[in-house]
Amino acid sequence: MTFSMTTWNINSVRLRADLVVRVLTEEQPDVLCLQEIKCTEDQFPHEAFEGLGYDHVAIHGQKGYHGVAILSKRPFTDIVRQDFCEVGDARHLSARIEVSGRQVRIHNLYVPAGGDEPNPDTNPKFAHKLRFVEELRAMRAEAEPGVSALLCGDLNIAPYETDVWSHKQMLKIVSHTPVETEGLLAAMDEGGWRDLVRRHIPMEEKVFTWWSYRAKDWAASNRGRRLDHVWASPDIAEASTGVAIRSDARGWDRPSDHVPITVRFDL
């Protein structure tokens, strides 16, 4: 049986509900994980997605900020909302679904951006980000016996040299500083996770999922970063068959600065 999951930082689901409908219609994922929905559960635009087959919705929302949601064609159970760093932010949501008799835990994450100054002593936002990544290191791919795991979302770090437009020029820029990239890679390694994007796209090839709104012509300058990720436990990683990054979505009307990633599996 085939199975697919899409992850996307939508940067306000109410503002861009029509773009979500477009992705659901064109990509037809079994599960869609959204980050930065910027609304509470009662404000979520359920009516926009009615009739599309995504009858199962879990939300960890927050008024005006952050927030994550999972839309699924399949029923899910055991919904968990973890409060990273114990500051009350809505940055994590997980649920368990069944695919071909296999139990799969899906973690949807929105890691703090970290502000502009990469100094935790003078920038509380950056200190928060580093604490968040440190807690992420405790999340294990094989934490639940007999349950496969997927972890996706806007992790706000581009860990490899080919995940940014210029490694040298980005070394002192938040999202690609050594303390961030080393922390994220440690979380992936210690947690036993596999990077599905890099499983299917060679390391020497540049891959971006985010382009700044500040660029006058984002496509021409192409100064992107790979801030969005999909990780998997080893067992389900082996079943992944491909990944699609919808770079064209950055050029849609009133776009998010992130684009959707869809990973497909043969289970």
Image (cartoon, rainbow, N blue to C red):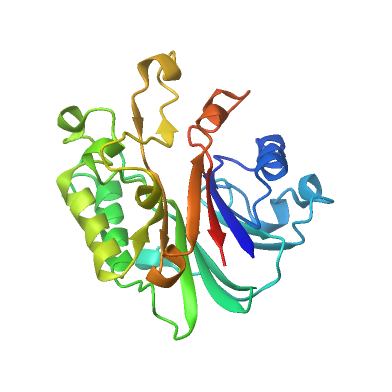
Q: Is residue 90 above or below residue 191?
A: above
Of 235 and 216, nearer the camera is 235
Q: Position of residue 148 (x, y in %)?
A: 48, 74
Using the rendered image of the protein, determine whether residue 39 is visible from the camera's viewpoint.
Answer: yes
In the picture, the quarter occupied by the N terminus is bottom right
Residue 259 left/right relative to 14: left
* Residue 35 in view here: no
How many marks can you see?
Answer: 0
For residue 206, side relative to residue 263 (left or right): left
Looking at the image, residue 98 sits to the left or right of residue 11; the answer is: right
Decide if residue 172 is on the left or right side of residue 175. Answer: left
Of 196 and 20, the residue lying toward us: 196
Q: Nearer the viewer, residue 109 or 247?
A: 247
Residue 190: x percent and y percent?
25, 69
Residue at 64% from the left image edge and 43% from the top image edge:
13
- Residue 234: quadrant of the picture: bottom left
Q: Check the image and report above or below for 46 versus 118.
A: below
> Which percent across, then down, holds residue 28?
68, 48
Q: Nearer the viewer, residue 81 or 119?
A: 81
> Which quarter of the image is occupied by the C terminus?
bottom right
Q: Does 223 sit above or below residue 111? A: above
Q: Residue furthest bottom?
A: 145
Quarter location, residue 144 = bottom left
Residue at 28% x, 41% y is 175
Q: Residue at 40% of width from left, 69% of height from top?
A: 233
- Asked if 110 appears above or below 82 in the picture, the reply is above
Q: Position of residue 228 (x, y in %)?
A: 42, 46
In the rendered image, the residue lying farthest to the right is 51
